[in-house]
Image (cartoon, rainbow, N blue to C red):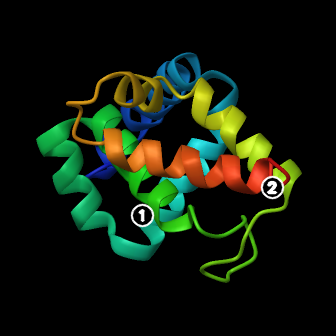
Amino acid sequence: MVRARGQEQAISQEEAQKLLDHEMRQEWGSVFEQKHRAAMRAVHRFADGEVVSHLETLMGSKSALKFFSAVGEAISEDRVEGSGKPGFKPDPAEARAQLDSLHRDSQATEALLDRDHPRHTEYRDLRRKLYRHAYPEE
């Protein structure tokens, strides 16, 4: 996601991308690939190189990646990866996997534990929806 503005920055840009990936792998842990894919979905759907570059300048690459990951997760929360159908309901196993991922997400956990957090309601509602799909018999 880190983009160079000129040829002379190609080597340092590659190093910056590796450092960003390393930092995010440490922060996101086992959900890195999922969050990274969500970020790339959002970038491809809503942004071009210029928009990404401006956001990285304003926010920093790490914050921009987190932002796009959150957007990507939000736009795909009602569909199973690859289904392409909004509103497609996950089966119980998929919902349990998504719940597990949600519980490992430090940002989601922080929001769920703090009722005053701006995304508390969003994560609470997502968790409730996933529980309904994960455990339909209860």
* Residue extending farthest top: 26
Mark 1 surroundings: few (<14), some (14-19) or many (≥20) residues within 10 A: many
Q: Return the x and y of residue 120 as percentages of the image width and height.
A: 33, 38
Write the residue at 44% across / 64% down.
42
Count of all numbered marks drawn on residues in the image:
2
Write the residue at 33% across / 70% down.
47
Mark 1 or 2: in front is: 2
**Left or right for 73, reference 115:** right
Query: How far apart are labels 1 and 2 at the CA level?
Result: 34 Å
Question: Is mark 1 in CB contact (under 8 Å) with mark 2?
Answer: no
The image shows residue 73, relative to residue 108, as above or below, that is below
Mark 2 surroundings: few (<14), some (14-19) or many (≥20) residues within 10 A: few
**Left or right for 15, reference 61:** right
Residue type, numbered disc 2: Pro
Q: Secondary structure at mark 2?
A: loop
Which residue occupies the foreground of this view, 132 or 53? 132
The image shows residue 91, relative to residue 88, as above or below, that is above
Which residue occupies the foreground of this view, 121 or 137? 137
Q: Which mark is residue 130?
A: none
| Residue 118 visible in the picture | yes
Write the residue at 40% across / 57% down.
71
Residue that carries the numbered disc 2 in the rendered image = 136
| Residue 1 visible in the picture | no
Q: Which mark is residue 43?
A: 1
The image shows residue 110, relative to residue 2, as above or below, that is above
Residue type, numbered disc 1: Val
Q: Secondary structure at mark 1?
A: helix
Q: Residue 97 falls in which quadrant of the image?
A: top right
Q: Return the x and y of residue 118 as percentages of the image width and height.
A: 22, 40
Q: Return the x and y of residue 27 as percentages of the image width and height.
A: 50, 19
Q: Residue 62 falls in which quadrant of the image?
A: top left
